[in-house]
Image: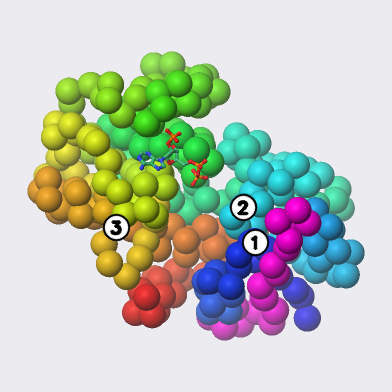
């Protein structure tokens, strides 16, 4: 049987085994998909052993995505841009590293709107933000502004992508007096239940807000947007399922139907 796993620390909470089992059943693929908890200082040993023992592919989660980037023998262009890897598999050239997070976000967003020409505000400048910038730019938005608590990090991140007219970085406290069609929260503030210090001008009642975090209750950021009158609010559960579908497609060559799997996960939160 072909063997896959999600590697992380901790990994007990990961929904990836559930998602991939559902994809496999739906597409009649025979495979196993398990959880692999690597010691915090043992990612490379664990991942290498998995492949030596005949494993076919790994999904990589917190806190190993940057180490997986270093571990891969070959990187896809989008993994290179993201500086992080969430999907590994073996081919003739060795271990290939890809990053499906940004594609997963874009696919989830596209279920609701087209990104072409939109004014997009991306909140945060850490790994989660970096992973989605390339795929967002590919959709040809009208503007992509990265705003971060530490302004210097947002400016430096924007400068890595050579698109000065389209893509800029600034501090959360330096936002221009304008609204955005789409606001994406890629900070970890929602983890702590914190809302963000945003001026009232950023919100658009008919715009869309997206939090990469998710939970049983609406996240702090989505509640903040609701209070500002934004009707269309999405959390990151859809991105989780879509990034998995993209990895499944890379491994198996078959694209699963994500809608029923998302509904099942939502019901189980
Ligand atoms: P990740 O990989 O999830 O992106 P990270 O690289 O540690 O994690 O980045 C966390 C992001 O959340 C950063 O953009 C951080 O802002 P700073 O760079 O200024 O630290 C942001 N963040 C975390 N907690 C926040 C809070 N309470 N308010 C605003 N931004 C916050």
For the residue with label 1, is its CB less than 8 Å from the closest atom of ligand 1?
no
Residue at 80 percent across and 53 percent down: it is 44
What quarter of the picture does the C terminus occupy? bottom left
Question: How many angstroms separate mark 2 from mark 1 (CA)?
Answer: 6 Å
Q: Residue 8 carries which label?
A: 1
What quarter of the picture does the N terminus occupy? bottom right
Residue 145 pos. (x, y %): 35, 28
Is 67 or 41 nearer to us in this picture? 41
Asked if disc 2 and disc 1 are in contact, CB closer than 8 Å, the reply is yes
- Magenta range is 23-43
* Residue bearing mark 2: 63
Question: How many angstroms separate mark 3 from mark 1 (CA)?
Answer: 24 Å
Is 186 or 137 nearer to us in this picture? 186
The local crowd at label 2, few if under 14, some if 14 to 19, many if 20 or more residues have their Cα within 10 Å, is some
Ligand 1: which quarter?
top left
Is 127 or 30 nearer to us in this picture? 127
The local crowd at label 1, few if under 14, some if 14 to 19, many if 20 or more residues have their Cα within 10 Å, is many
Viewer can see residue 45 = yes
Residue 133, above or below 154: below
Residue 157, above or below 131: above
Q: With 213 as the anchor, is 118 left or right in this view?
A: left
The picture quadrant where one finds residue 167 is top left
Circle 3 SS class = loop
Residue 97 pos. (x, y %): 71, 48
* Residue bearing mark 3: 219
The picture quadrant where one finds residue 154 is top left
Question: How many angstroms separate mark 2 from mark 3 (CA)?
Answer: 22 Å
């Amino acid at each position: 049987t072909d063997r896959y796993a999600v590697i992380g620390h901790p990994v007990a909470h990961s929904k990836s085994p559930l998602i991939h089992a559902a994809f496999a059943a739906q597409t009649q693929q025979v495979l196993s998909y398990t959880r692999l908890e690597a010691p915090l200082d043992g990612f490379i040993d664990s991942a290498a052993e998995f492949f030596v023992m005949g494993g076919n592919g790994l999904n990589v989660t917190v806190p190993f995505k940057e180490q997986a980037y270093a571990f891969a023998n070959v990187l896809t262009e989008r993994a290179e841009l993201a500086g992080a890897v969430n999907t590994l598999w073996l081919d003739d050239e060795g271990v290939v590293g890809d990053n499906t997070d940004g594609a997963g976000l874009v696919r989830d967003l596209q279920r609701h709107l087209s990104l072409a020409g939109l004014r997009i505000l991306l909140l945060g400048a850490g790994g989660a933000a970096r992973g989605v910038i390339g795929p967002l730019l590919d959709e040809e938005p009208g503007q992509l502004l990265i705003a971060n608590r530490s302004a210097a990090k947002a400016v430096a991140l924007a400068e890595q992508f050579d698109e000065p007219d389209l893509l800029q970085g600034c501090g959360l406290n330096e936002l221009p007096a304008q609204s955005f069609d789409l606001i994406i929260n890629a900070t970890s503030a929602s983890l702590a239940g914190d809302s963000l210090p945003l001026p009232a001008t950023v919100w658009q009642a008919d715009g869309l807000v997206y939090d990469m975090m998710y939970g049983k209750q609406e996240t702090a950021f989505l509640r903040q947007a609701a209070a500002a009158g934004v009707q269309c609010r999405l959390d990151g559960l859809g991105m989780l399922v879509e990034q998995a579908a993209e990895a499944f497609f890379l491994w198996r060559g078959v694209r699963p139907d994500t809608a029923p799997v998302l509904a099942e996960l939502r019901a189980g939160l």
